[in-house]
Image (cartoon, helix red, strand yellow):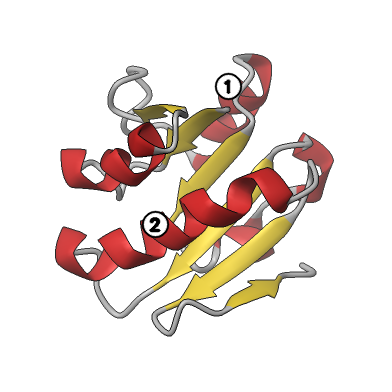
């Protein structure tokens, strides 16, 4: 699976759970898309084509029409974007990605609960 991590997820530690699971993972900076607006990143990700997009931007599902993209979207709901706080959520995301249908939008909280988002 080809996975894109949002601009707020640049640490190499955050890629590792996906790499360990055999996925190919890039972040927005790797793609040269840093500083682009969310709608531009979403359009580029769709045309690349990435299978999944991971973000810690909790407002994204309410600001963009994500279900029409056909990508799996995972929103990390954490009080901090520090890698030590996010690595467990990234592991959970890696574990569930294969089970999610294309176009699914879910939130993972710090208790590792996975909840569908219906924006």
Above or below: residue 61 compared with residue 31: below
In x, y percent, where is residue 116?
Answer: 73, 70
Picture quarter with the C terminus:
bottom right
Does residue 65 appear in this view? no
Asked whether the residues under the numbered discs 1 and 2 touch, taking CB atoms below 8 Å apart as contact, a structural biologist would say no
Task: Please give the label number shown on residue 16.
Answer: none
Place residue 31 in its image quadrant.
top left
The residue shown at (36%, 30%) is 28
Q: Position of residue 24 (x, y in %)?
A: 44, 23
**Which residue matches tag 1?**
44
Quarter in which the N terminus is drawn: top right
- Residue located at (40% from left, 28% from top): 25
Res 46 quadrant in image: top right
Q: Earlier in the sequence, mark 1 or mark 2?
A: 1
Check disc 2 and report the residue beneath it: 91
**Which residue is nearer to you in this view: 81 or 1?**
1
């Amino acid at each position: 699976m080809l996975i894109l991590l949002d601009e707020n997820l640049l640490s190499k530690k955050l890629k590792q759970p996906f790499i360990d699971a055999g996925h190919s993972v890039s972040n927005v900076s790797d793609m040269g898309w840093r500083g682009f607006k969310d709608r531009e990143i979403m359009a580029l990700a769709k045309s690349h084509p990435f299978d999944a997009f991971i973000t810690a931007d909790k407002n994204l599902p309410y600001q963009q029409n994500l279900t029409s993209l056909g990508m799996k979207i995972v929103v990390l709901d954490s009080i901090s974007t520090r890698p030590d706080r996010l690595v467990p959520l990234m592991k959970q995301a890696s574990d569930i990605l294969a089970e999610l249908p294309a176009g699914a939008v879910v939130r993972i909280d710090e208790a590792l609960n996975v909840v569908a988002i219906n924006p």
